[in-house]
Amino acid sequence: MRCIDPVKFGALCWPDMVLYDKQREILYSLRDNDETVVVAGNGLGKDFITAKGAIWFFTSRRPARVVTTSVQGGQLEDVLWGEMRRFIETSKYPLPFRYNHLHIRHLRPDGTLDARSLLTGKVVNKGESLLGYHLEAEGDIPRTLLIFDEASGIDDSVYNTGATWAHRILMIGNPFPCENFFRRFVKEGDIPRKSGVGFHRKVIRIRAEDSPNVQLGFDEKRAGKEPSNRILIPGLLSYAEYVKRRALWSPMRQSISLDGEFYEGAEVLLHPLDWLNAAERRADALGHPRKAQGRVTMGIDAAEGGDSTVFVVCDEAGILELESLKTRDTSVIMGLTIAKAQRWNVKPQDIYFDAGGGGKQHADYLRSRGWNVKTVAFGGAVTPQIKTARFNSLTQRVDQSEERYVYKNRRAEMYGLLRRALDPGEGGDFALPACYGELRRQLELMPLRYDPEGRLHLPSKNKRSATSTEQCLVDIIGHSPDEADALVLANFGQWQKSHRVQLVSA
């Protein structure tokens, strides 16, 4: 099946799937322009159109090579490739593919595989090479496509190697705080080809107001009608949800998730970007991976619901290792805990589990086998030793003559201690390897908040415990901050050891 028009191809294979203007614009830009940069809010069909564009490109020429990339394995496999699997399974006409876990090959008419054609998915980290996918163009037909999914988290080095062979590049994602090629290209805007025909780079911005569901609500209001909240395209942001987000979300979150804009306001972050950049430079100087320096601790945030279980190992200098996997199996978690402890020489009493979710269960299982690991309740009381009459940069709102706790609860305490470890004004020298892009994103989005008593606090993790006027962390970040939670557990262990504080497990 060959079809040069991507919109007609979609209508032919999936006649019940409706595209809106911005999605059609992306597909035609993918066909006509060298590079397409799409910056978009949430709930606007990014993964849907990315998957459709990848399948169209791969189907419409032979041979062809399409590489989809992300810094998150879950985003790549479950979300983007979940959409592609759905397209393949629901196509009105059978697509000539052989599918095998993040690999798709063309099938020849005789049923054999075309070795030159490949559609694949790849998780990329800083310094990752994307070489080896070169394929010569034939005439004016581009045969290689490189897709950067969640492009705000992808390093320049990955883009630079991919740009040496890709005939077409699609960069798409939310405008999360970043200083990489994605932000630069968005700021630079459209770059016409020297020939005057088409664009070398085309920038497309999708705002919440571009959703036909939201547009309908506005149209009804302008006509003097009560918005019906009718859904024209399932899966896209609704008018009712749009109004709710405008009312409740912070300016930063509205800018990122509704307006498709990189936030330029004055809202203060718990972990400022320049601190995180400095932490990455320190990690680069130390090298990664590297040998441990001094005492070693491990933080484990066990999966709850659809979350991931995350292991973070830290030494006195910073992060040694981070691993995230989707499992709630106690035997698997116990095995990995012991293996990592043996690899890094972590003593059982220096292993910290989140007491919530399944963490206590896993910890109890290890204890029953002689491993005296610790559990920490994020919602618990602040460590009694953390008192001060002289408040540092974390809070200037409290009367310094009065002794109080600096933090509202244990979660705020642990994140506050990580902030101190990053703060150059406090002598912070924490090293954060740049390869952990999802961790970096979670830290970037953590807001700096104080309660009425001047204590640092974090918004509630989920909607169940959030107040009616406070946005929860899951909404701010987009999902549970599992990587960040595991990190602050490990760093909390470092702080306890350096201050000789004894923790009684929750």
Image: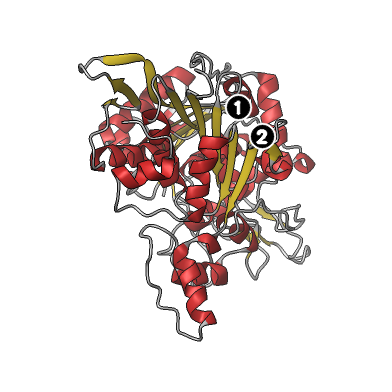
Outermost bottom residue: 224
- Amino acid carrying label 2: it is Phe
Residue drawn where x is 29% and y is 53% of the image: 16
The colour scheme used here is: secondary structure
Q: Are marks 2 and 1 in contact (CB under 8 Å)?
A: yes
Q: Quadrant of residue 362?
A: top left
Residue 96 as seen in the image, left or right of residue 291: left
Position of residue 126 measured from the top left corner of the image (x, y, whole percent): 59, 25
Who is closer to the viewer here, 231 or 349? Answer: 231
The answer to whether residue 368 shows anywhere in this view is no
Q: Is residue 348 above or below residue 9?
A: above
Say if residue 290 shows up in the picture: yes
According to the picture, the residue beneath numbered tag 1 turns out to be 159
Q: Please tell me which residue is depicted at 43% across the width and 32% down the height of the picture.
A: 57
Q: Residue at x 43, y 39 (%)?
A: 5
Residue displayed at 40% across by 64% down: 464
Is 411 rendered above or below residue 114?
below
**Residue 494 vs residue 148, the one in the foreground:** 148
- Residue 288 falls in image quadrant: top right
Q: Which mark is residue 181?
A: 2
